[in-house]
Image: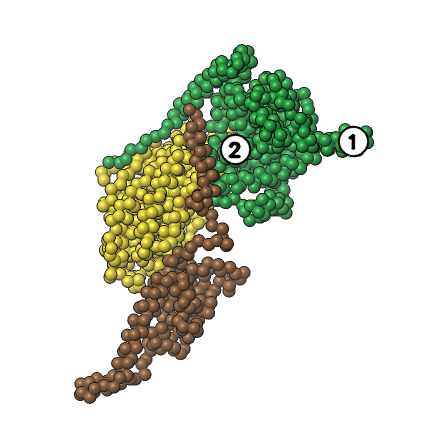
Chain colours: A yellow, B brown, C green
Amino acid sequence: MSTITLPTPPVLNPPASLEASASENPERLLELSLGPQHPSTHGVFRMNVVLDGERVVRLKPVFGYLHRNHEKIAENETYLGNMPYTDRLDYICSLTNNWAYALAVEKLAGIPVPERAEYLRVITAELTRLLNHAALVGFLLQDMGASGTPLMYAFREREKILDLFEALTGARMMCNYMRFGGCRVDAPAGWLDQARKVVADFPKFLDEFEKLLVSNEILMERTQGVGVLSRELAISSAISGPMARASGLNYDIRKVDCYGIYPRFSFRVPLGSHGDVYDRYMIRILEMRESLKILEQALRDIPEGPILDPKSKPRGFRPKPGECYGRIEAPKGELGFYLISDGSPNPYRYRVRPPSLINLTVLEDLCLGHNVADVVVILGSVDIVLGEVDR
Amino acid sequence: MIGTGILKGLAETARNFFLSYVSKDRLTTVQYPEQRLPQIEAARNFPFLVYDGAEWDAGMRCVACQICEKECPPKCIFIEKSKDKKPDAVGKPQFYPARFDIDISVCMSCQICVEVCPFDAIKMDVEFDLPTDDRFAGLMLDRHKLSKSNEYYHEIHPTEATAVDTALDAERAKAAAAKAAAAAPKPASPAATAASAASTPKPTEGESK
Amino acid sequence: MIVAAVNAGSVDQVFVLAKHALLARTPDALQPLASAIISIIPLLVVFPSLFAITTVLERKGLGRMQNRLGPNRVGPFGLLQPAADGIKALIKEDVVPAAADQLVHFFAPVIFVAAAFVAYAVLPIGRNMVIVNLNAGVLFFFAVGSVVELSVFMAGWSSRSKYSLLGAMRAIAQMISYEVPLVLASVPAIMQAGSLSTVDIVNAQAGYTGIWPHWYLFTPWGIVGFGLFLIAATAESNRSPFDLPEGESEIIAGYFIEYSGFKFALFFLAEYLGMFATSALGITLFLGGWSAPLGISLFTVVPSYIWFFAKLLGFICFFIWIRGTLPRLRMDQLMGFAWKFILPMALLNIFVTGLWRFLPASPLNSIRWIVCAAVLAAPCVVLSMSLKQKKKLLIRTYHFAE
């Protein structure tokens, strides 16, 4: 990865014209609180918007309604006991959360991971990426008023993947599957064939989806040119994931860090050029296609073997004192875990880098000057899950 | 020409409408409770205690080692050891739980208790139909409510149960062989006599591991 | 014009004959009043029942489009669902915000429903079956239809809530913008029939040449006029993709966010009634009202009111189909569409109707057709291209990182 020279940060205030019109007649402005109970804020999230007619003049996000003390609880739990809590961070993508945490602990304690476990990790992570992007695209269209039809199609496909997860891990949503040194349980008989079938059937759904929506004039009008995130702002605000790639930033941690066995798979990283909602939406659909490629290769090449490091045991795990930061390319961005160990069975400090929260910091800049209807669409394209934002 | 994308979308929806009458793939509703989805074997909901044989009290495998209580992340298991002992799954006299409560309003179905149990005594159930109108006592399952037979375990998780049974049978065989070797008449050789004197059956102390 | 030799069959006229029989038994002095009441009662019974059926149809239709069953627990195939919904609406607590303007808040749904019902007075449901045959029937319809916009604004303003205020503003802007194209789209039919009376317009279309009907839909200006009317009617009824005033995912219920219980049900009822009324007007103006699609005896023997309701059902299915497919337009796009595309096309359509009248009606109407179709199609294409160009909406291609 080449070094990035940071440009001077852009001015993060509302543009002069809006400020002027707002200050000359403050009674014209309407202050509205979108949320926390709102059909389209993706959870208990609140935005205090100040409107001039229909245009947004200021936007202040208020969150914390779902704060559950995750990081403090982690300081009093064993390392293994924290694994089920990581499921509940980004509750749509529990397996990638598990992997990020397992990666951080394995880095801290220097635990190797057998081949088959690595392949299983890649397979489950890419299936999770499919889950997340399908749900997001469905919800984006639901927020735009397509009365649920694309959402239902997306969820119909998700059900197949969730059945796979239930057969492998025992639960659809809170999987608790990764362990330090591998995975908890091996794939049962017939699972790999079922997975191959699901992966083979998925492109048909993507084609249908594209036919339904990509050239739809109403969709294009509502999303093109809306919520433009410039490349400079993305870099200076630490935006990661599909949102950054839609603004033209070539940063995919699977290619940068080369964690796990990702270097073995050939896949491309799609990049957008405009950075608007339409780009973010299309980048996610293209990423779904790339994930399918990775899945085909992984399901073809997965070897036999153990799925857990033989030296690992479930109880009495005490890593040596030290610190480490482990990160992966979660479907929403860069999910990282920073751990400080002091030699006891509980972590001394446990910090989650939530991609949803970091990506939310630019919400005001994206929404200024747009309509209220656009705010909802822009928020949908940022792809937040409150479990991760509030932890 | 304006509207072509919209027309394509309309065609897609109409296609789904008509196909929903014809193909199963396009009408995925399963009308619960008359129809049920096929049970996936690995599914898990809340834990239960396995007992062998016909009597739940005598056949319970749990030896009250309290490892699951310590490892449970939300601390929803409450165990009290008994004062006396009874034979466990392998035949060795062990303590047993006088009280074993799981608060299922707290339990997060993480399955860590199953992972750490050394005696295959607690496993995951699949029953989710557990409504009650008592928010506290109704959701605190005691050891009677938690005990389900090994046959039930075979019904819900056949592969796992068979593997567990094989392992337990091997252990029982080993334990029985050790007991038989200890009780058999020894040949009259000095080393053997000394060995047999050393290994005369004494009442074995049942220690919890 | 060959009028089909259709006997005013007794099945076709059963309601008219029944009304005459009942009137014959009432004393003379009371006859006008009795006539009015007898005409209104079927209206008050039939259209709310149609509303009930439509709610089930809509939910089941949307469900099938989304690969799921609609409601199917209450009654066979869920057909008693409206009864359950009605009971639920009636027994809910009627919550009125303390800061709301109580009188206006109460009267808004009442006026909405009343206006919606009054508009049916001039719509011919069947042969000789219209409540009042006004000389200026279409004008009356549009006048009453505008009262609906007033009631929407009353609801939004009196609720004293920011969300409902936003919804009311959007609703007024939208309904006024689309009122103009709606009226202009119906002018060609009036021009061709030469009368504002709905009965005359239907009678002008009730003839057949051979088996082909004289519907105004089968003319180039009729096709375009019908299309514009349909779009404007969708917008006037606040249906998707123009349901921004009640944009469920943004301002939750827009102008009726502070209504609960029976008043909410009344809003729903009135909205659907308005949808039916506008569709019925569209049927009257372009689809020949109660006349059968083909002049063959198999079709003409079916009673006229059956044809009317069949066409109305077709409209309802179309609205449901559109709702299940399209996302909603944003406010400024909606208005831009109205003023920059629909309005110019409607004006052009009026001009082309005039052209149609003055061109010679050759045996196959081919010259008229070609000329009028060309005059309509070319600006349509140009306008749509210019709309797209201005926003530079393109299907983009994406590149991948090296």
Whole-percent x, y for residue B81 in the image: 40, 73
- First in residue order: circle 2 vs circle 1: 1
Q: Chain of mark 2?
A: C
Q: CA distance from mark 2 to mark 1?
A: 42 Å
Q: Residue furthest front?
A: C297
A337, above or below A225, in the image: below
Specify the quadrant that holds the N terminus of chain A.
top left
Is the residue marked by circle 2 packed among few (<14), some (14-19), or many (20+) residues within 10 Å? few
Q: Quadrant of residue A357?
A: top left
Using the image as rendered, state which of residue A112 and residue A265 is in the foreground: A265
Disc number at residue B64? none
Residue A123 seen anywhere in this rendered image of the structure: yes
Q: Nearer the viewer, residue A227 or A39?
A: A39
Residue wearing tag 1? C24
Secondary structure state at the residue bearing disc 1: helix
* Element type where label 2 sits in the image: helix
Foreground pick, A360 / B118 = B118
Name, please, the residue furthest toward the left. B190
Tell me: B104 left or right of C39: left
| Residue ID at (55%, 28%) | C233
Quick check: A151 above or below C177?
below
Q: Residues within 10 Å of mark 1 (few under 14, many from 20)?
A: few
Residue A371 percent across, percent down from the top left:
46, 32
Residue C318, which numbered label? Answer: 2
Q: What residue lies at 28% left-to-right and 35% top-to-bottom?
A: C400
User: C111 or C198: nearer the eye?
Assistant: C198
Residue B120 picture quarter: bottom left
Q: Position of residue A32 (x, y in %)?
A: 50, 38
Q: Residue at x 81, y 29 (%)?
A: C28
Q: Mark 2, mark 1: which one is toward the viewer?
A: 1
Q: Which amino acid type is marked by label 1?
A: Ala
